[in-house]
Amino acid sequence: MIVSMTGCGEAVHSEGTVGYSLEIRSVNNRYFKSIIKLPDSLQFLEDRIEKLLRGELRRGSVFYQLRTHNDVEGSAASINVAVLQLYIEQLTKTRLPSGVHAQLDLGTLSALPGVCETPQPDEQLSEHRGAIVEGMTRRALASLQKMRAEEGRALLRDLSEHCTRMREQLVVIREHAPKVIAEYRDKLKQRVDRLLAEARLELDSDTLAREIALYADRCDISEELSRLASHLDQFTEACAKEDHVGRKLDFLTQELLREANTIGSKSNDVAIARCIVEMKSLIDRLKEQVQNVE
């Protein structure tokens, strides 16, 4: 069953005074791409989270954001007074151009490298927090996958409807294709008979038959119709039975369009041309929706 690349999953966790909030969102992308945002104290988990995401998701742009808060006193970043003092000493000794005045701002100073230091947890606490985040990630991914599966079912309904309408157009073309040769034969014979009557000449029936045979060969679309029907069968089977088929479906829509274009160019008939226009419109809808299939 096909799965959409669009979805959202969330997870929360609290332990004592520490709270965790996680959100994972995904949108369509030709390849897999992840953007992971973690608190400074949990940056060491980025590689582990990347592997978890890649293990569950094949394609799509994935946005992963984890937020934490800690109400314990002393959990905030500490000020390195020695580093701050060195910055102040160097700045006060700096000579400014004539007429230029500047004031030291604590907010700006605190953003300088090394001034604010985030408390680093010990190894045991880091592993404990890592296990919490990993469990939250798995829960959020399960929620995300559930939503992507629901979106996939909606996509499947639309894709199946488009394929059904394309098959209806195929039936019309198959029924009308034999009439094209007969109509051409009748028109050609009428035109030749009129010209010969005016010139008082006679035309060998074999010559007329050869001309009709050449036209029939140029306008033969039986192979294209068979390939188009085969591509449609593969498309619907892949949607119903296979996972992670976005790229395969994308390729099949290209092949469907190729066959439709060939039929349109070979068949010099108004009724068939109308069917091809409708069919190409349906293929465009398929191509648009397939872009969101994983």
Image: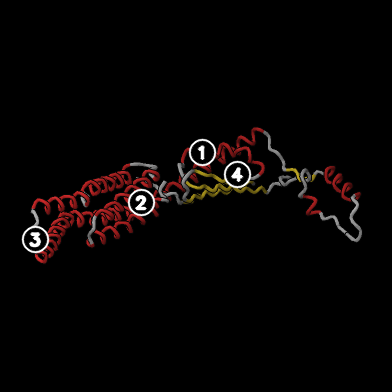
The circle drawn on residue 207 is none
Labels 2 and 4: the sequence-earlier one: 4
Q: Nearer the viewer, residue 182 or 241?
A: 182
* Front position among marks 3 and 2: 3
Q: Earlier in the sequence, mark 4 or mark 1?
A: 4
Q: Is residue 236 above or below residue 200?
A: above
Q: Where residue 212 appears, x then y in whole percent?
A: 15, 53
Q: Nearest to the eye among marks 3 and 4: give it.
A: 3
Residue type indicated by callout 4: Glu
Residue underneath mark 3? 201
Q: Label for residue 15? A: 4
Of callouts 3 and 1, which one flags the residue occurring earlier in the amino acid sequence?
1
Q: Residue 85 location, x and y as percent?
A: 86, 46
Q: Is residue 121 left or right of residue 65?
A: right
Q: Amino acid at mark 1?
A: Leu
Nearer to the camera, 226 or 123: 226
Tell me if mark 4 has few (under 14), some (14-19) or many (20+) residues whose alpha carbon lies within 10 angstroms of its own.
few
Of pointers 3 and 4, the one earlier in the residue sequence: 4
Q: Residue at x 23, y 54 (%)?
A: 170
Q: Which is closer to the viewer, label 4 or label 1?
A: 1
Mark 3: which secondary structure?
loop
- Dot 2 falls on a residue whose secondary structure is helix
Q: Which mark is residue 153?
A: 2
Mark 1 — residue? 52
Q: Nearer the viewer, mark 2 or mark 4?
A: 2
Q: Helix or strand or loop: what does disc 1 sit on?
A: helix
How far is the residue under mark 4 from the one under mark 1? Answer: 23 Å
* Residue 270 vertical placement versus 38 (above, below): below
Q: Residue at x 59, y 39 (%)?
A: 46
Residue 32: where, in percent of width, then height?
49, 43
Is residue 87 visible from the viewing direction of this image? yes
Residue 131 occupies quadrant:
top right
